[in-house]
Image (cartoon, helix red, strand yellow):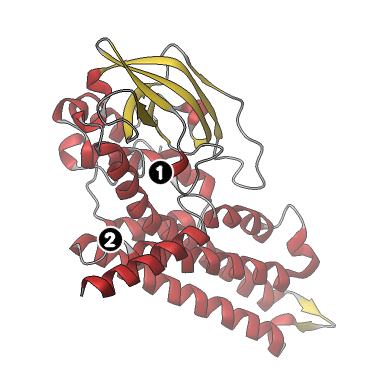
Amino acid sequence: MAREMGLFGYAIDQEWGGLGLDLTQEVELAMELGYTTLAFRSMFGTNNGIAGQVLVNFGTDPQKAAWLERIASGEVVASFALTEAGAGSNPAGLRTRAARVEGGWALSGEKRFITNAPLADLFMVFARVVGADGDGQIAVFLVPGDAPGLTVGPHDKKMGQEGAWTADVHLDDVRVDDDALVGGAVEVGYRAAMTSLAKGRVHIAALAVGQAQRALDESVSYAATATQGGTPIGDFQLVQAMLADQQTGVMAGRSLVREAARAYVSGEDRRIAPSAAKLYCTEMAGRVADLAVQVHGGSGYMRESTVERIYRDVRLLRLYEGTSEIQRLIIGSNLIRRQRQS
């Protein structure tokens, strides 16, 4: 059904079989998807997002022709293999190695928490070049899921988003041809990672707004019907205050997401705005989810409660694609850089 609806390619250009949504349109869809379940979105989110965008923005024409149409249709599940045990939000600590061999490259290293790894047909593998032109730089390679030497560990057991499968990826002397180097140049890798992550942060912010809206709606519904001492709890002013804080956060987050998407599409701001949106909206979703559990009382702590699932699911939003701490560093450093340049 997701394939039939075009969900694997909504952010991929129409010439490759996608829907070609720009980011202002994509965030509207993301807020709706966020209202359902974050795990459902992850099934096709990486094809459209951080993995697919590497090829959309930096792939050579032959690379695009080989993969993008199949990625957009859902025939191929793509995975973004950047994170390592010692290199998460900041890829400077990347240890996976890419060494020159005759006719191509040999990749060795370990990746961690890689979304869709157990299902992936194609990995965008980021590795540090050693002993060749571009020594020390980060490059990105297209690695088929069935490449000899590539193995995927068991899927991770997580606090939330259980339906979004992540796992470790091990690369033991994985050989790829020269045409697997994205963009045909080593220096493309770091820019590809940063560009894909910046756009992805606006998308994550929109998902957070969707989840927060769902938590708010669940809270309002419960407050209007549940009673305490024969009185609907929604009549109590302290409960109303919690609902008001939730509503304010959701409205502010939605406005920020739309503004960040507009600035990204126009090219006005592709650094500060994405990080500000992700920082505020993911933190806000955590607060709104916490208040939702509080409004529900003991029933909100039970596994059968929707808000209990939301509470666990949204916690991850503050970690992946750049932690809240990293977003603060990006915002602060770019504000100073902007001032100095002016």
Q: Give the SS element for disc 1.
A: helix
The residue at the far bottom in this view is 237
Which badge, 1 or 2, comes first in the chain's sequence?
1
Looking at the figure, which quarter contains the C terminus?
Answer: bottom left
| Residue at 20% over, 62% down | 267
Which kind of residue does numbered mark 2 sit on?
A: Arg
Residue at the spot of label 1: 45
Q: CA distance from mark 1 to mark 2?
A: 20 Å
Q: Is residue 279 above or below residue 244?
A: above
| Residue at 37% over, 49% down | 197
Q: Is residue 51 above or below residue 317?
A: above
Q: How far across and how far down the image is residue 6, in percent? A: 31, 41
Residue at the spot of label 2: 270
Say whether residue 87 is visible: yes
Q: How far across and how far down the image is residue 248, in percent? A: 51, 80
Which kind of residue does numbered mark 1 sit on?
A: Gly
Say whether residue 125 is visible: no
Looking at the figure, which quarter contains the N terminus?
Answer: top left
Q: How far across and how far down the image is residue 333, in percent? A: 38, 66
288 sits left or right of 176 in the view: right
Picture quadrant of residue 257:
bottom left
Q: Is residue 21 above or below residue 295?
A: above
Task: Please give the label number shown on residue 30.
Answer: none
| Residue at 27% over, 70% down | 338
| Residue at 27% over, 75% down | 339
Q: Which of the two marks, 1 or 2, is nearer to us in this view? A: 2
